[in-house]
Amino acid sequence: MTGFRLAKGGLVDRSTALNFQFDGKVFSGLAGDTLASALIANDVHLMGRSFKYHRPRGVISAGSSEPNALVELREGPRKEANTRATMIELYDGLVAKSQNRWPSLDLDVGALNSIVSAMFVAGFYYKTFMWPKSFWEKIYEPIIRKAAGLGVASKEADPDKYEKAYAHCDLMVVGSGPTGLMAALAAARSGARVILADESAALGGSLLNENEEIGGQSGGDWAAGVIAELASMSNVTLMPRTTIFGWYDDNIFGAVERVNDHVLEPSPYEPRQRYWRIMAKRAVMAAGAEERPIVFGGNDVPGVMLAFAMRTYANRYAAAAGKSVVVFTNNNSGYRTARDMKAHGVHVEAIIDSRKESLADASGVRVLRGGMITNVTGGKRVTGVELADHRGISCDAVAMSGGWSPIVNLMYHRGAKPKWDERIAGFVPTNVGEAFVAAGSAAGKMLLSECLADGARAGTLKGKTPAIPKCRDEAFAVTPLWWVKGSAGKAFVDYQNDSTAKDLPLAAQEGYRDIELAKRYTTAGMATDQGKLGNVNAIAILAEATGRTMDQVGTTTFRPYYTPVSFGAIAGPFVGHHFQPVRKTPLHEWAEEQGAVFVETGLWMRSSWFPQKREDWLASASREVLATRERVGLCDVSTLGKIDVQGNDAAEFLNRLYCNTFSTLDVGKARYGLMLREDGIVFDDGTTSRLAADHFLMTTTTANAARVMSHMEFCHQAHWHDLDVQYVSVTEQWAQMAIAGPKARTTLQKIVDGATLDDASFPYLAAKEISILGGMTARLFRISFSGEHAYELAVPADYGNMVARSIMQAGEEFGITPYGIEALSIMRIEKGHVAGGELNGTTTAGDLGLGKMMSSKKDYIGRMMAAREGLMDKNRQSVVGIRPSDARDKIRAGSHLLKKDDAPSMAADQGYISSVAWSPMLNMWLGLALLANGRERHGEVVKIFDGVRNIHMYGVICDPMHYDRENKKLHV
Amino acid sequence: MRINCPHCGTRPVEEFTFNGDASVQRPASNDPKTMDQWFDYVYLRDNPKGRFDEYVHHSSGCRAWLVVTRDTQTHEVFGVVTARDHAKKRVKA
């Protein structure tokens, strides 16, 4: 043995040396190493500092349960914090940094916390930071935030790709140890579609770590044979580097495949990680069991690790955890480690077995029965142990085994709880249904022969179970030892949170007896490892402190994710522009040509205003309004929802959807419609036109287009399935533009084929199919939102830009001006038309001044509930117009209205301003408001109170229609 | 969770939109004396643990409204029918 790399054995490739950096220092490892094994082979055990006391920490485990050896992996935008060194596959050029230390891992100022550790007992945060109250925001919170957390995330954007993928199978096997391999083999041979997933880089599970003998071969060789057979079968998918992190409804499993975490940089054509959803008809939990630490003084000194981990580093990675080892155990696992280490040429000082009696084979190693380690000496590296009988033993590494816990987490993601099994001293799975069964040591079967047989049984979906190979069994016997009471120094239950054995009885004493409460009070079982190693010990210590059994205390709730999942994997490809689609209207190109400034409304990009030279939005919108009201304007209204309704019962269907009547609408005419919710509140509005007796075109507001469609489908299918009607959204199929203003008719006339648009043939509210530009079919509606003589012209979407350009050309001689939704909004407020501010989910038809639209001659959605007393109350807030008393004042939406002489209070509140606009026509700010009994109060002077800006002013209530009250302009 | 749409087959739950209790039925009458029935229909909902009939819209699929019978505790789906068939059956019953 040279250094700490064993001369022989292991699954590492000695011909491929890999250079890597840890805390700026360059080391060399071998292909097949993990970062943890490579550091151990370089005699580096100090890998991090603990969370609370900043104690020096080394690696404890050899797998995903690792609580201590958390590092920042990679640099720059690819930096990943809190990465387990035990799961990082070594690659050439790897860079990692230790965490939670300053200025360096070796010399860490935070370690002073350890000296004042009496302060840091259970509930520390709750006890310390409560007073004085004023300190919280300015002093405590910033300090806690700075001290909390371990690694630091990169603030740069992740340059790598992530994918989402779906898979289906007859049987999914979680874990590829002896149990998993037999299960997969049994199912695969019967022709079933099998997925075999394992979180490790290599399949084989414990067979890669242990000295086993199966079918006359080494465990590793037997596994390689089975894996080769599985790999050759087209019905089998092998998924190494894949963690099954959650079990969901319908036997769906979530998984993360680390496709390229083991290389310096992923190929540009491959993702870093892949987020899987696996639909499994059946699944076998074959994740094995997790070894537990023992809670004794100094059980966190670098060099103390799990017995299984120590022999894994030696057997699989040819890395010796020390030159002289002491083993502390309460079960046979410690003996196995002693034998393996001895076989590798590592000196084993003694096995300290807490049991008085044991039949385990120590192969000549000294055994101290009934022994206890009370303290581990050494700060940054083990120098020896002290026993309960005050003897001391020198050593540089300690292997500990407190027994085994079946890995049951996944099986309890849907609410059930495991039960305590005295025989194996572990929580074992209960029945959670046929679709997901545990097998092997995950089910509490602790012998290799049991695992092979159990796996084969669980994997046999039909036909014969494959023959079970003969194997050598390691006897299993355990006598619980949770906490060495006479420990000197700190004995840790939860390494990652620095929870000690004394914290749990203290929590119980202070009333936190429930395991869920104790967990949160002591923080044992929290953080990235979720207590994989510490939880059972915590439960046992709490059980003892409160005189309860393990089952009475029970486990905390197991939840996804089993191990941390990166945000990149969760987001998958849906980042940047892929996060949500952009909807562009068919007139987008035209609007761009006209210099539009766009605004996002939902997914839509709508043209908001069309600035000329250096106009700001208000100057631009005001100019657009004036141009439209005086000459002619063109506005893109394509985003309005358009629903084509056809069928013999189309009119009846609309009668039932709208509160007003549509069956009386003449063919070729449009009508404004108001839709209520079933509770009587206004839902949506828009014009609907009758193109034929059995054919209507409905329009909805932009925001409600999808909701109205779903509502129609629901009403039709669930309430009125007998109606003969069909309807489909045609929003995307038509480009629609408003042409408004005194010159609108003259402009349009220039592009219309044949027909004249005079009042006789095309009166107000006419809605007809026409031909334009020499043969293009279009729909023309004489409707107006602006209050001007106006039309809406609909053409097939692809012609939108061309038609808009043609209209601009036709209107050029009249000074046609494109206008955006800002100008549109100003004009609708001038005209007192209600929109989003008033159709706000609290207003009735009556509130909006549209009460007369509600028919009493038919049933419709919302009719009954709209008739409720509270919704008919005359004191309800209704829509009014409002103007500042002093025309120079600016009123703001959201301001509250009060009686003229009242002071602001909720009790005195009379309503609020729902929409405001600067009116270029009236040269002042004006608005719409919702005011108690508003219709009776026109002319009243009210107080306008803006509590946010602390503005008081006076305003006058008026009719909502501020401009052209006689609607003369509609008909010019 | 997956839902077996009668038109589209078994599809992931993300394609669907839930809309609550399907056991309620819109009253046929507009007689003010039936106001209590309307209150029940619009507002009153049971929140059962266990078997539950629920309106579900296949909003990212065939756009059919469905009635899914599921266990609110385990999410086990016992059956799926279209809202149309559900309504027809109710008329007969």
Image (tube, rainbow, N blue to C red):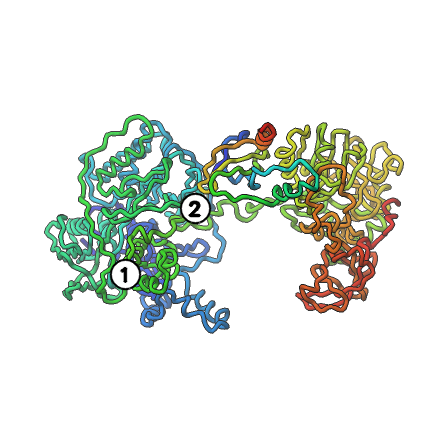
Q: Position of residue A729 (x, y in %)?
A: 66, 36
Left/right of residue B79 with respect to residue A611 in the rendered view: left
Q: Is residue A783 left or right of residue B32?
A: right
Which residue occupies 19% across, 56% down?
Answer: A328
Nearest the viewer among A282 and A512 is A512
Q: Circle 2 is placed at which residue position?
A: A272
Q: Would you call the spot at circle 1 few (<14 residues within 10 Å), some (14-19), or many (20 or more)? A: many
Q: What element does badge 1 sit on? A: loop
Answer yes or no: is residue A399 visible. yes
Q: CA distance from mark 1 to mark 2?
A: 33 Å
Q: Is residue A52 left or right of residue B50?
A: left
x, y percentage for residue A617?
Answer: 73, 57
Identify the chain of the residue marked 2, using the numbered disc in the image: A
Q: In front: A391, or A405? A: A405
Q: Which numbered circle lies on residue A642?
A: none
Q: Which residue is mark 1?
A: A300
Position of residue B44 measured from the top left corner of the image (x, y, whole percent): 58, 45
Pointer 1 and pointer 2 on the same chain? yes
Residue A245, by quadrant, is top left
What amino acid is at disc 1? Asp
Instruction: State the image coordinates of residue A750 (x, y, percent, origin top left).
Output: 85, 38
Residue type, numbered disc 2: Arg
Quarter holding the C terminus of chain A? Answer: top right
